[in-house]
Amino acid sequence: MAGRLGFQLRWRLSVLWALEWGISGTLLTYLPIYWKQTIQLSTSQTASLFAVAAIGLWVAPFLVGQVADRWLASEKYLALSHLVGGLMLIGFPHAAEMYKRTGDNFVTLLVMSGIYSVAYIPTWALASSLTFRHLSDPDAQFGKIRVWGTVGWMSTGLFLSLWLMQVQFGNWLSQFPQLNTPRQAISDAFAWLPDPQPSDCFSIAAMLSFTLSSFCIFLPATPPERSQRSGIAPVEMLKMFRSADFRLFMTVSFLMALLIPMYNLVVPVFLTTGDIQDGWVPAVMLIGQISEFPALLLLALFLKRLGMKTTFSVGIGAWFVRYCLFSISGGAYPLIVVGLALHGICHVFMIIVAQLYIDSQCRPDLRASAQNFLAFVTLGIGMPLGLLFAGELNDWIGENYALLFAIPAASCLLLLVLFWKRFQGPSRTEETAPAEQVESEEPTTVCPSAEVLQPNWSC
């Protein structure tokens, strides 16, 4: 039976996740439009900026994992990282405008993107490892905390849309005369604010970064796990590759990471080919985040009734269906909306399940290293290569979206068949041994048994 999650711990971890993913919600849904239509970068240049962000995942398992698992408290590392990230976000609009005027400092944007990624991206996995450390029953309790990441993403994405489209939103409200008085009062109260600019996505994200950096003082103390075992944490964690199932799962995960960037890079621009204005794209893409709520509620049921293998397979299948819908939509919004709404299953049934499993299988003193390494394989290697591939493919195919989305759809189907036929792991999470048992094993054993290993898919 799950232990009760105390209010003091719950609200602090919930705020952590709301701010952590609020930053991403401000940037990821709008940046493809900002780079392409405001700064006038090509799709391949935009893909390069996103791909450079993988530098943060290259250093994460080796630097961040060692620091957080051996030397420095996780909450202190988070505070420092978000402070540096906020400072970099303030500088992005100035460098972007300089490139737009001169066209000769694109390398500066690449360097800044790399520095920001080193500061911010490793905090995704570190927030997970910190949270798992303080939960007595992660399988039952993590969803109640993680859902606030979805709330943060949705809130900041919606706020960005309302901020950028405030004139249009005000005109729409004008058809309700009873709202004229409060609307005018609000307008007068905030008249000192500057007019909205596309680059405000950076300003909002910077404010969230500074807020989270300051809030880290309230997070529960999470010093490095005391352990009698010697060795460098990231190197010890690599012993998980002794499992054949682990190697197969990581291969499938890596290949899936090559296919998913087509969604992040192309879909925001794809939406603007219809009647959706640029500023409303973040709000429209909230459909995907809203779908995370029922997906999180269904997650425990799927794991209990169907097992880990089937749950992962459903996640891969959801990506196949999603790309098929985009491909055959022909711009029809009902099909596009269904494709967006599948985000909950695509995200929760692959990423969150993987994080839960990795936490349950790894030694307590290797949690940060394991979470960051598995993100490194998919986000750090697979995702940037996928971004570069998606950018080049989009530039080559152009706006033939039927063909553009059909390619990743067919690839997802092939990977689903491969995974289902070859993966031999346990079908249910109950069959895996708890992490606590690992401490009684041989010092060189990372997980209870090679036969029960199942790897993470983090993207």
Image: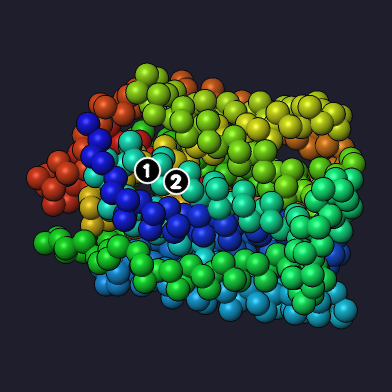
**Number of numbered labels in the structure image:** 2
Category of crowding for the residue at label 1, using alpha-carbon neighbours closer than 10 angstroms: few (below 14), some (14–19), many (at least 20)? many
- Is the C-beta separation of discs 2 and 1 under 8 Å? yes
Question: Element at badge 1?
Answer: helix
Residue designated by label 1: 142
Q: Residue at x 74, y 78 (%)?
A: 95
Residue designated by label 2: 146
Q: Where residue 125 sits in the image (x, y, percent)? A: 42, 55
Can you tell which mark lies on residue 399?
A: none
Identity, as a three-letter code, of the amino acid under mark 1: Phe
Q: Is 332 left, or right, of 113 in this rendering?
A: right
Question: Element at badge 2?
Answer: helix
Looking at the picture, tell me which residue is in the foreground, 27 or 64. Answer: 27
Vertically, is 171 above or below 199?
Answer: above
Q: Can residue 115 be seen in this view?
A: no
Examine the image and state in which quarter residue 216 appears. Answer: bottom left
Looking at the picture, tell me which residue is in the foreground, 326 or 344. Answer: 344
